[in-house]
Image (cartoon, rainbow, N blue to C red):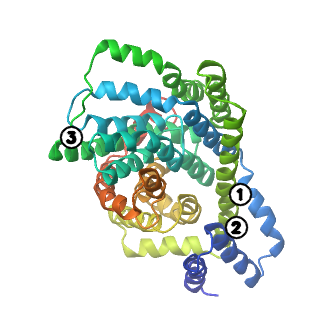
């Protein structure tokens, strides 16, 4: 079968199944299995490919970071951090809105999942923002956008997935995400401030050193969490996977013995929720590995890359095209599938232009953060809408401001790769 026909057929089957309502994992698995059988690639390699896709040491960090984030949420760390950050923003215009972004950035350093962070921050911020006069749609969109920082700022489940595909160092990807995460947070906060200034929303809290000091002590155990997790990684004490396990035990220690906010029932519910979320991720990863294997063996990924390169040999045009493809895919497909379907496709392009794959991974992940608030899929928006008690269409209307702001951040990071590479270079992770 000719490569263009194979390429179209493989993706056509996948998208038809999606349109028929099949789960992402089933659509990926069915398309891949169909081509395994049709092209006599050996049905017996289905199981080894599925298992091989998930049996990777870096991926062990995924369920543990999911569990750690859920434990930190249940322990009550978020409430303590919120109180501190609201005091720091004082009575400035949009102080409450900026506080949401600051907490979203902090939470990114303890939880690597966008939807999980959305749920954790949504129940705290949205009712209070509405009480302060902010529209429910804007409040929900802001929380969802800020939660997207969790997949950029380490530790990040998205960066773990990227590294497991490209074999890039997870530690290097983590350190590379810091400055881009802060830049993205700045653009989100700028959008929130402009909106608040235009409509006259102002924080009622006042900046008092005494209150700030008390709140810092009150939130101390939460503030230490990123230092424990990330400091251990970059101090060479443990790997990212081991750091995820440390994060779980740290959260349990704080919840059981310091704050005493955990009990057996809460722990059971957290374990159950984390197990379900992790299982969904891993099933998608397994079937996506089969899909990717078929695409590689049949030359689909290479043919797709050649087709993109045939459009232009200008690296800026190709980069724009690649990012546009990821953006459109993000509006229709879940983030896990996007990594496993499109990253192998773009690897030949990265090699062709001699792009730094660490930098490209950061751009890819920032684009996924945009996808998490871009209709119609918009995972984070579907999480906040029920919390706010409003229709999803109301959240959609307010999300476009933040889609634009994160897109501007992506543009800046595309023009200046050093924002992603300077810390890895300073620390000796990248030459």
Q: CA distance from mark 2 to mark 3?
A: 51 Å
Is residue 354 something that shows in the picture? no
**SS category of the residue bearing label 1:** helix
Between residues 170 and 283, which one lies in front from this camera angle?
283
Which mark is on residue 201? 3
Could you say which quadrant of the image residue 213 lies in? top left
Q: Nearer the viewer, mark 1 or mark 3?
A: 3
The reply to whether the C-beta atoms of the residues labelled 1 and 2 are less than 8 Å apart is yes
Instruction: Locate residue 314, reporting x and y percent.
Output: 34, 65
Residue on which the image places disc 2: 290
Please name whichever residue, 397 or 108, is drawn nearer the observer in this view of the structure.
Answer: 397
Residue hosting label 1:
53
Q: CA distance from mark 1 to mark 3?
A: 49 Å
109 relative to 190, above or below: above
- Measured as percent of width and height from the top left, residue 145 is found at 39, 49
Of label 1 and label 3, which has the lower sequence position?
Answer: 1
* Quarter of the N terminus within the rendering: bottom right
Point 32% across, 49% down: residue: 409
Q: Could you say where residue 329 lies in the image, as x and y percent from the top left?
A: 47, 67
Give the farthest residue toward the top: 210
Q: Is residue 365 visible?
A: yes
Residue 124 picture location, percent across and down: 44, 39
| Distance in Å between CA atoms under marks 1 and 2 | 8 Å
| Quarter assignment of residue 97 | top left
């Amino acid at each position: 079968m000719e490569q263009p026909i194979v390429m179209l057929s493989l993706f056509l089957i996948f998208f038809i199944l999606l349109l028929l309502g099949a789960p992402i994992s089933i659509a990926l698995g069915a398309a891949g299995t169909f081509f395994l059988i049709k092209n006599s690639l050996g049905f017996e390699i289905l199981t080894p490919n599925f298992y091989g896709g998930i049996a990777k040491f870096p991926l062990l960090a995924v369920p543990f970071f999911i569990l750690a984030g859920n434990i930190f949420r249940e322990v009550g760390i978020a409430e303590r951090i919120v109180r501190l950050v609201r005091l720091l923003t004082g009575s400035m215009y949009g102080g409450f809105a900026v506080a949401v972004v600051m907490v979203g950035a902090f939470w990114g350093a303890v939880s690597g999942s966008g939807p999980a962070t959305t749920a954790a921050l949504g129940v705290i911020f949205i009712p209070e923002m509405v009480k302060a006069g902010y529209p429910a749609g804007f409040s929900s969109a802001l929380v969802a956008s800020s939660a997207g920082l969790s997949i950029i700022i380490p530790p990040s489940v998205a960066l773990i997935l990227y590294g497991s595909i490209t074999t890039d160092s997870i530690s290097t990807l983590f350190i590379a995400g810091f400055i881009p995460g802060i830049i993205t947070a700045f653009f989100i906060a700028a959008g929130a401030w402009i909106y608040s200034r235009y409509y006259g929303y102002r924080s009622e809290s006042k900046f008092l050193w005494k209150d700030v000091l008390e709140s810092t002590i009150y939130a101390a155990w939460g503030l230490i969490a990123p230092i424990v997790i990330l400091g251990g990684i970059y101090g060479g004490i443990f790997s990212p996977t081991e750091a995820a396990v440390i994060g779980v035990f740290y959260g349990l220690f704080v919840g059981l013995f310091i704050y005493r906010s955990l009990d057996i029932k809460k722990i059971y519910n957290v374990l159950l929720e984390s197990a379900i979320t992790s299982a969904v991720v891993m099933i998608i990863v397994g079937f996506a590995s089969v899909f990717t294997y078929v695409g590689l063996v049949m030359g689909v990924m290479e043919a797709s890359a050649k087709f993109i390169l045939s459009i232009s040999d200008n690296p800026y045009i190709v980069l724009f095209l690649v990012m546009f493809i990821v953006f459109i895919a993000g509006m229709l497909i879940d983030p896990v599938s996007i990594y496993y379907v499109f990253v192998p496709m773009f690897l030949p392009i990265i090699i062709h232009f001699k792009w730094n794959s660490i930098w490209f991974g950061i751009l890819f992940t920032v684009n996924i953060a945009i996808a998490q608030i871009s209709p119609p899929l918009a995972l984070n928006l579907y999480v906040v809408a029920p919390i706010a008690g409003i229709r999803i269409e109301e959240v959609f209307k307010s999300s476009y401001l933040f889609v634009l702001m994160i897109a501007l951040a992506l543009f800046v990071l595309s023009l200046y790769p050093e924002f992603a590479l300077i810390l890895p270079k300073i620390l000796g992770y990248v030459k």
